[in-house]
Image (tube, grey):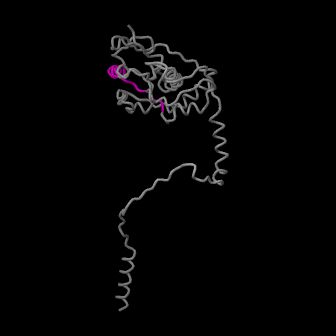
Amino acid sequence: MKKYILLLFSLLVLVACEEKKQSLYKIEGSQIPVDDKIVSNEDVEKLVAPYKDSLETQINQVLTFTKKDLNRYDGKLESSLGNLLADLAYEQGNPVFHKMTGKNIDFSVFNYGGIRASIPSGPVKYRNAFELMPFENKLVVVEITGKKMHELVDYLHKAQRAHPISKHFRIAIKNENPHKVMVNGNKFDENRNYYVLTSDYLQNGGDNMMFFKDPVNMYELDYLLRGAIIDYFLKQDTLRVTLDGRFQTVD
């Protein structure tokens, strides 16, 4: 009799310990408006205050100076801010690439939409660098073929926008067709490969720049584009930028 009682007790324990299958019954949600009706928490504000003050001090630190407004709207096919961004990325990125490979970047290309803010005349601060490039985009170098270069030129030609390209690359359009393409003072050679500096976002086909996908080789510089911007600004007493005709139409 004791054996049966013990067996029955064991079965009851097993049944009680058996995991019940859980299933989703329903999902509910509600909107909580964030407005001036929300009362601030004094304890939280005291806790955050030292970090907020430290961040405000750092982000308002002056890096350099510009005598004129820099934006992406002051030219049809090139812009002051686009030229600055492409040139500084090349200047900061090429030494890193050369140290890695013993080679030099041919030119740099970025996208018009990647410029997220203008820089007004006057002191240029950390804040401006973060507003200009709020994303964590990294610099990469892609080795692309002459065929891919044709696709890049065709993309720029059809876009007719001030995509940032560095001074090492020049394109002239005549009668709605690419008329002349020069790289570092030499005529574009479709039989050779080119090393192009861009961002990891664009290398992955962002903004339909599909010519950067599946390159011959790709080199990650482990360098944020924003970091390159800040490092360059710190080296300059005053930013000097011109529209030099790197992308233009000719008669």
Residue 150 showing in the rendered view = yes
Residue 121 point in image, percent of width and height: 60, 23
Quick check: is 127 in the magenta stretch? no
Quadrant containing the N terminus in the rendered view: bottom left
Q: Nearer the viewer, residue 237 or 7?
A: 237
Number of marks in picture: 0
Residue 38 point in image, percent of width and height: 57, 52
In the picture shown, does residue 131 fall above or below 80? below
Location of residue 227 (image quadrant): top right
Residue 169 point in image, percent of width and height: 44, 16
Location of residue 27 (image quadrant): bottom left
Q: Which residues are magenta?
A: 138-154
Q: Nearer the viewer, residue 172 or 109?
A: 172
Please report the residue visible at 48 percent of the width from the left and 34 percent of the height from the top.
Answer: 137
Q: Is residue 126 left or right of residue 86?
A: right
Quick check: is 152 in the magenta stretch? yes
